[in-house]
Amino acid sequence: MKVSCVAVFVGEALATYGFGDNHPFGPDRMAAFWSRMCEAGLDKRVRVHPPARADDEDILLFHTLEYLARVKRLSLTGRGYLDCGDTPAFKGMYEAASTVVGTTLAALDEVMRGECRQAFVPIAGLHHASRDSAAGFCVLNDCGVAIEVLRQRYAIQRVAYIDIDAHHGDGVFYAFEDDPDLIDVDFHEDGFYLYPGTGAVGETGRGEAAGRKLNIPLSPGAGDETFFRLWESAEAFLDRLAPEVIVLQCGADSLSNDPITHLELSEAAHAHAAKRLKQLAERHAGGRLLVLGGGGYNRDNLARAWTAVIAALLGETR
């Protein structure tokens, strides 16, 4: 069987990013995904790559030097919190978080070199961290670093960031809120009901970026029918702005029965987003689509959702 040009990045070094066995974001999440991939036989149809580490030069394209120094310091002891209580420090945190960033950048490099025009990293999409602080289980924002790398190293201007995690991708949104070339489309549970409480419909960008961001809050209990209906206008928005590269954060916590959220999507929504964004990338971006796993705290849900995403990128329907 011919090897697909979809790249998937997995390995123990990537799985070390987690906050303990009893934490929603535990170190077993990657294994849950990969086990389902192997059961489905999709591991033989993708090009598998190992994780990679980012160096400080990469990380500092998005984060401040002072914040990175704090991450390193708390990483030595593994004590305390990086924020007000959601993101505990753990020993080796700096190494684990820099592996998430480095693996995202390795996947981006694969996409940009053209070996595989689509690439997926399961333990990635840490969209809450801001430039100078952690938040919501996110120590370093690999999404933000990837966007900066696209601008500063690949000379890409119009990047589309699409986020279907149940939580608003605030760390990305506010970092680029006034950037007209960062096209942001974010489906999430309404912030009135769920952390981080942001991403209202009226938040559409500031200054020259006004009208270049699309926040789509969903009511608790919203399911596939709502998602599919709203997707059409979101896709038209993206088509009109014609991005040069697309980044999808496909958090699986928007599926029904996630322990900390209240949406009721199925994996069909994630497959639909992946399929349609691949087509949009082929129209505007030379096929270049980077996919990041994001949240998801029901292991069966994330396994089903992310496997459905890979199947869609491979052109399968499940």
Image: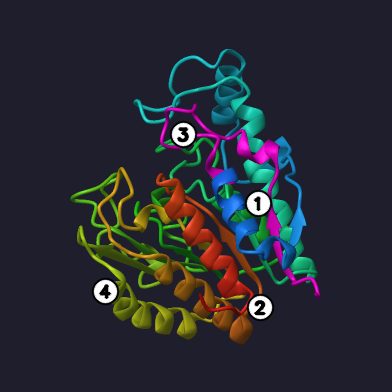
Q: Which residue is mark 1?
A: 104
Screen quadrant of the N terminus? bottom right
Q: Kindly identify which numbered label has been placed on residue 133.
A: 3
Q: Label 4 is placed on what type of residue?
A: Thr
CA neighbours of label 4 inside 10 A, class few (<14), some (14 to 19), many (20+): some
| Eye-nearest disc, 1 or 4 | 4
Image height of 229 relative to 76, above or below: below
Q: Kindly identify which numbered label has been placed on residue 140.
A: none
Task: Tell me which label, 2 or 4, sits earlier in the chain.
Answer: 4
Task: Tell me which label, 1 or 3, sits earlier in the chain.
Answer: 1
| Eye-nearest disc, 2 or 3 | 2
Task: Tell me which label, 2 or 3, sits earlier in the chain.
Answer: 3
- Residue located 52% across and 67% down the image: 308
- In the rendering, at what x and y percent does residue 192 appear? 18, 51
Q: Label 3 is placed on what type of residue?
A: Ser
For this view, does 143 lie left or right of residue 183? right
Task: Tell me which label, 1 or 4, sits earlier in the chain.
Answer: 1
Where is residue 291, by image quadrant? Answer: bottom right
For this view, does 205 lie left or right of residue 239? left
Is the stretch drawn in magenta largely helix, strand or loop? Answer: loop
The magenta-colored residue range is 1-30
| Eye-nearest disc, 2 or 4 | 4
